[in-house]
Every structure is written in structure tokens, then in C-alpha cells.
Amino acid sequence: MTGMGPVVDDGRMGGVPERFEDPLIRLYALADEGILVVCPRCRGRAVVVPWPDRGGDVFESPRRLACAGCGHVATVVPEWSEWGGATDPYFGLPLWLRARCCGGRTVWAFNESHVDLLERFVGARVRERRASPGTMSLVARLPRWMKTAKNRDEVLRAIGALRASLTG
Ligand SMILES: [Zn+2]
């Protein structure tokens, strides 16, 4: 990807904006939109959603795993959850959206909104920090290797792979 000149946002295909302002989204909020995981039965794409409905406590409200491919369904009332790795916090299943990157690192996302956010952040030339009351935003917590300019192209390619597997 070198020698091709700067990335130009021509507005097509939801082009990557040059300037990024942290929307202060937290990982927990994205979890409520549904987490794409690898189905433990058929290895296809399944989703983990709040169950029976949204609005409960993100750490304690029940979650449901459902696979449209094989019909597998499971529910869990979380007694604990583990956040910040390439598995879903409730069932511990591998995330569907994972891509190797930068010498053994893994870029991962819960869902399409998460991919959008990562793409906008990593692709931006100018990143505006905002004060984040309470727990840091998802963007503020991203690891250093995802933020360095020298990894930008490689990380963006990995994010592109995530986007491709949204429709695959
Ligand atoms: Zn399945």
C-alpha cells in the first residue's frame, strides 16, 4: 500500500473522514446492540443479545445466544463477565469479527457499529481527544499499537477484513 499517495476521502462508499472526534462510546453500549460470535455447535455466525429485552444492567442482565444457521439457542444469567479480549464477555465464545494484524495482534469487534467506529478512528489523520467523564471511552482504551501511524495501513486492512466477514 505504499507509494499510492495519501488516502483521499471522496465521500463515496462511506469514505474515511480525516478528522475524528471521539463519540465517547463505551464497549458496554456496543454489547447491547448484539455481539457476533462463532456458534459453538456449527461454527457459523451467531449473535449474543440482551434477553428478554434491552435496558437491563449490562453486567447482570440475562443474555441469549442464537444461531440462525443451526438453530442453537442458549441463555445465561451472567455472574461475571470478562471484557476487553477477542471473546464475548458472557459466554466466552470467540468473536466472529477477528483479524490477525501487526505481528500476532488481533483486531476484534463486537458488531458493525464497532467496526465503523474503529475504521473512523484508525483512518483519521486528526484525532480530537475529549474529556471522558467516568470510565474511558472505547477509543481512549484502544491499545497503542492500534494508534500508531506506522501501523495505520495494516490495521485498516484488518478492519477491512472484519467488514468483509460481516456480509460473508
Ligand atoms: Zn450454529
Image (tube, rainbow, N blue to C red):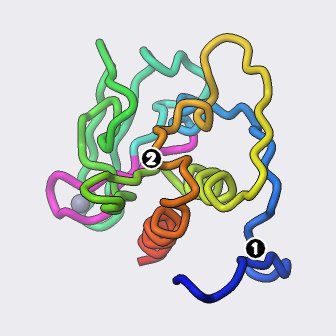
**Residue wearing tag 2:** 145
Q: Earlier in the sequence, mark 2 or mark 1?
A: 1
User: Does the residue at mark 2 contact the one at mark 1 (Cβ under 8 Å)?
Assistant: no
Residue 120 placement, left or right of 87 = right
Q: Residue at x 27, y 46 (%)?
A: 73
In the image, 58 versus 20, the foreground residue is 20
Q: Residue at x 40, y 24 (%)?
A: 62
**Amino acid type indicated by mark 1:** Gly
Percent from the top left, x then y, of residue 61?
45, 19
How packed mark 2 is, by other alpha carbons closer than 10 Å (few <14, some 14-19, many 20 or more), is some
Q: Is residue 133 left or right of residue 93?
A: right
Specify the quadrant of the image occupied by residue 84: top left
Ligand 1 lies in quarter: bottom left
Which type of secondary structure does the marked residue at label 1 adopt? loop
* Nearer to the camera, 5 or 67: 5
Look at the image and tell me whether residue 53 can be seen. no
For disc 1, the marked residue is 15
Quarter-of-image position of residue 14: bottom right
